[in-house]
Image: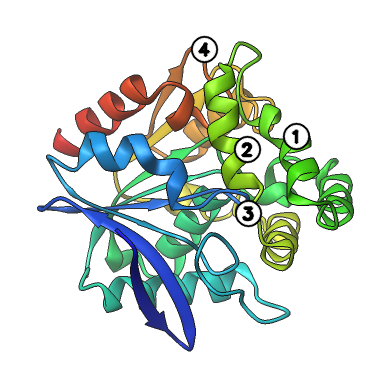
Amino acid sequence: MGLVADVNGLSIAYQSVGQGQPLILLHGFLCDSRCWRTQLAGLSDQFRVVAWDAPGAGASSDPPDGFTITDWTHCLAGFLGAVGIERAFVLGLSWGGMLAQELYRLYPERVDRLILCDTYAGWRGSVPAEAAKRLERCVNDSSLSGEEFASRWAPEMFSKDASQELLDEMSAVFRDFHPHGFRLMATSLAETDTTDLLPEIKIPTLLLWGEEDVRSPKRIGEQFQSAIRGSELAVINNAGHVSNMEEPEEFNANVLRFCLS
């Protein structure tokens, strides 16, 4: 808890619990390592679970202007080296799933298995007609106060039946969002298209999708399943976009089954 690594001049905060095969958790563009609370607790008896705050999120420093998904990928590889991890199970949700794909593209030797959750082939790859509008909204909303920002964005992350307790937990994270980091991450989503990469993924891949995800609908998970040969799609009922927080027991059970198989 409360750990920090220096990578290429950036201060990277992270959490690391447990022993064994490393499992890396990559959060979405408004989250940080706090959003993995139930995975850090529920999976650390089997793995060394490491959850970073990406540059531009949480307790990590902001990246410079013009930082791209490729820059985040090199930073992630440097972070893995800094914390002594050569090869890992890599789990990414939403923006973090796009980052996981790019890690496999640029550093395939670092990735043992892939778990892609409620993610995209970039907005340009998965929702091209919406990419510009989504980015415009992110840029506009990045000037809001943390309180107003959280009230607008937190409900979109879950199903319509999400508990107030869950919304409060996410709102506490969203109130601390980094405007600069958020704009850069949104820009990277709008500019990225990984559809060419998906057929080239040759390692075991699990796709986890919330049945009620409105940000990355299940049809996108089905497109990933069609593109990645041999991949498995598991749909989590009663869960929206951040399915790991809404249905943690089912989420963790799927991760355990896949990684230990």
How far apart in space, not on screen, are marks 2 and 1 (Cα)?
7 Å
Type of amino acid at the residue the image marks with label 2 = Ser
Relative depth, front residue between 214 and 204: 214
How far apart in space, not on screen, are marks 3 and 2 (Cα)?
9 Å
Q: Residue at x 80, y 51 (%)?
A: 145
Residue for badge 2: 171
Mark 1 and mark 3 residues within 8 Å of each other at the beta carbon: no
Q: Residues within 10 Å of mark 2 (few under 14, many from 20)?
A: many
Type of amino acid at the residue the image marks with label 3 = Asp
Tag 2's secondary structure?
A: helix
Residue for badge 3: 176
First in residue order: circle 4 vs circle 3:
3
How far apart in space, not on screen, are marks 1 and 3 (Cα)?
13 Å
Type of amino acid at the residue the image marks with label 1 = Ser
How far apart in space, not on screen, are marks 4 and 2 (Cα)?
20 Å
First in residue order: circle 3 vs circle 2:
2
Q: Residue at x 28, y 77 (%)?
A: 81
List x then y, in percent, for residue 150. Answer: 71, 40
Mark 4 and mark 2 residues within 8 Å of each other at the beta carbon: no
List x then y, in percent, for residue 95. Answer: 58, 50
Q: Nearer the viewer, mark 4 or mark 2?
A: 2
- Tell whether 59 sits left or right of 85: right
Check the image and name the residue furthest to the bottom.
9
Q: Nearer the viewer, mark 4 or mark 3?
A: 3
Q: Residues within 10 Å of mark 1 (few under 14, many from 20)?
A: some
Number of the label disc, if any, that sits on residue 238: 4
Relative depth, front residue between 230 and 220: 220
Q: Residues within 10 Å of mark 4 (few under 14, many from 20)?
A: some
Q: Residue at x 16, y 47 (%)?
A: 47
